[in-house]
Every structure is written in structure tokens, then in C-alpha cells.
Image (cartoon, rainbow, N blue to C red):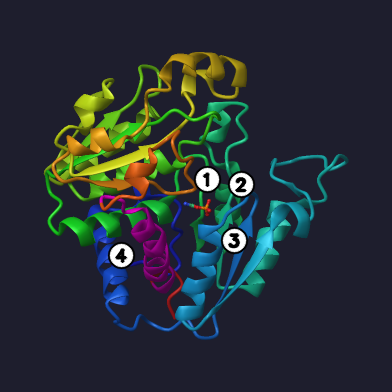
Amino acid sequence: MAFVHRDFLGLADYASDEIRFLIGRALDAKRGKRLPSLAGKTLAAIFFNPSLRTRLSFQIAMDRLGGRAILVNAGSDLWALEFDEGAVMDGATSEHVKEAARVLDRYVDALAIRAFPMFRSWDQDRGDTVIRSFAREARVPVINMESAMEHPCQGLADAVTITERLGTTTARPFCLTWAWHPKALPLAVPHSALLAAAHLGMEVRLACPPGYEPDSETLAKVKELAVGGGGGLEIFHDQAAAIKGAQVVYAKSWASIARWGDAEAEKAARKELRGWQVTGRAMETTAEGFFMHCLPVRRNVVVADEVLDGPACAVYDEAENRIWAQMAVLSAVVGR
Ligand code: CP
């Protein structure tokens, strides 16, 4: 399989056999197998937004592969970047992404970028201008550490977690459920969680209130991959019905695309939706299912304490598997 120098921007860009190869490599590393060394290789990980897991797990992954990671906070460490083609830069921005990316690729062997949506327009956000501009301008591979559209490293770690717990995944019921949250959150994690389950050929159930359906092109891709792998996609507006009999319950909140960027309208629409929480009682209706969330999570808002503190909770495995999944990606795309 050809991975070297390939960007890792989204699970939608990869074939299911390639994702399965990376899952296998991550699990091999977790069981103690040595992956190809990245001694002498450097990753620059640039954060336009905060992070706990992604920052530390990328640094640890590079350390374990024998390479090094330089972590950069874009807001405090970089010049204000311009992304518009042909911009007359007489305003607030000091450096164009063309120069930044072309300089960075002389310094490092891979770039990793986190750039959340701006929440002004969905059409604009779904273009992932920041990460795609770096990917276009830099000659080294670019890894997505969460953009508007995807969080593929989280999705791969989730696929690793599901595979190590279930073994065979084909046609197993996976439920992604929307959850109430006081803030409007991005769609990257739900998109990548759906794509991860689809790559595994699972029976994907999406539970959300009407109007909270994710990006339609992504859903079409999820359906294509899931059906191609022996599973399927079904959309539920009843959370209890979707969770019943599931073997995996993944909770996440996200903003409605129809009200994208309109915080007041979003707040009003959510008033009646506080019941969308994963409780111990809901988990009792699953087929001995386990609970997943990417973290950070709001306790007793998205999910009840008894689930997070109970035996069905897989969130710490997911967080640990970020390290193994990213080692698999880094060793594949940076290569030697
Ligand atoms: N799940 C995840 O990406 O966590 P951080 O935002 O803390 O990196």
C-alpha cells in the first residue's frame, strides 16, 4: 500500500483496506511490535485551537518512533496568517500560508494542523481552508489534527478501540447519538466516528433530533463504505430505539448545519432537547454495548456519571489508542 508522503486529512479519502492496514499496525504496536523508526525525523504540530489529548499523544507517538515533535500554538507563536489567494495584505495578517508552508517543509518531515471551524458559514467551513492550504503548499505530508470536516486521528483510534473490543466488526450495530450540550460544537468527530464505523462494515445507526443530520456528502460516503463492507446506515430520530441492541454507543454533540453560526437560534432550538443524554438505563438496553466519547466530555450533560464510571466505559482506551493510531499513521506517511 502506498502511504509515504500522502496527506492524512480525512477517513473519507482512504479506502477501507488502507484503514484496516493502519488499525492492524496500531494494534501491532500496542502489542509490542516495533514500527519502522522515525529517528532523525521531525513533526511540526500546529494548533490554532486548544487540546489536551492531541498535543500529548502526537508528542508521545513521535518520541516512541524515535523522532521528535515541535508543538506550536498558532495564536501566540506564529505571525497572523493570510489564506486568501491574491490578498492585498495591508490589514491584520503578516504572513501568507504560501511562505509559512514552504518554509516549514524545508525544516520538518511532516506537518500536523488543528484548525476548528469559524462558525460563520457552513459552506465556507466545510472547505477546511486552513488545513487544505497547508496541504496544497507544503511538499511534506500533512496530518489533520481536527478540522471542520474531520478528526481522522480520533476516528482511527476509535476504529482501533472497536476492533480490539469486538474482533469481527462486520454488520455489528454501532450507534452514534447526538447529545445536548450548552454550546454549538463542530461536526468533525461525528463525521470521523461514522466513517470509522463504516470502514469497519458496521450496521451504523445515527441518532439525532430532526434537523441535526450531519453533512450530506459525508453521510453518502458513510453509506457507500458501510454497505460496501457488509453493513449499512440507518437514521433514527428516537435515541432509545437507536441505542437498543447496539454493541457500541458513541455520544457527541454537534451544531445543526441549518443554523450554523447562529448561536441564538441554535440555543432556542435545543431548549427541548436536554433529554438527549446517555444514561445507565439506556446502556442497559444495549447488547452488552460499550460507551465511547472522544473527550473532553461534560459529565451529566452528554453522559451520566454511572456510564463514565461504569464497566462499559471505553473512553480511556480511546484516548490511549490515539497514541498507537498516530504511530501507525506517522510511520506510514512519513516513512524513510
Ligand atoms: N479528543 C481530542 O481530540 O481531545 P483534545 O481536544 O484534548 O485534543
Q: Secondary structure at mark 2?
A: helix
Q: Position of residue 5 (x, y in %)?
A: 45, 67
Q: CA distance from mark 2 to mark 3?
A: 12 Å
Count of numbered circles in the view: 4
Can you say which quadrant of the picture contains the N terminus? bottom left
Marks 2 and 3: CB-CB under 8 Å?
A: no
Marks 3 and 1: CB-CB under 8 Å?
A: no
N-terminal of the pair, mark 1 or mark 2, is: 2
**Measured along the vertical axis of the image, is residue 217 above or below residue 288?**
above
Q: Residue at x 44, y 45 (%)?
A: 150
Q: Which residue is mark 4?
A: 22
Amino acid type for the residue under numbered disc 2: Val
Q: Is mark 4 within 8 Å of ligand 1?
A: no
User: Which mark's residue is nearer the viewer, 1 or 2?
Assistant: 1
**Measured along the vertical axis of the image, is residue 55 above or below residue 33?**
above
Amino acid type for the residue under numbered disc 1: Ser
Q: Residue at x 60, y 30 (%)?
A: 119
Q: CA distance from mark 3 to mark 1?
A: 17 Å
User: Which mark's residue is nearer the viewer, 3 or 4?
Assistant: 4
Marks 3 and 4: CB-CB under 8 Å?
A: no
Q: CA distance from mark 3 to mark 4?
A: 24 Å
Marks 1 and 2: CB-CB under 8 Å?
A: yes
Q: Residue at x 70, y 66 (%)?
A: 103
Amino acid type for the residue under numbered disc 3: Ala
The boundaries of the magenta stretch are 312-331
In this rendering, would 248 be left or right of 38?
left
Q: CA distance from mark 1 to mark 2?
A: 8 Å
Mark 4 residue crowding within 10 angstroms, few (<14) / some (14–19) / many (20+): many
Q: Residue at x 25, y 33 (%)?
A: 282
Q: Which residue is mark 2?
A: 130
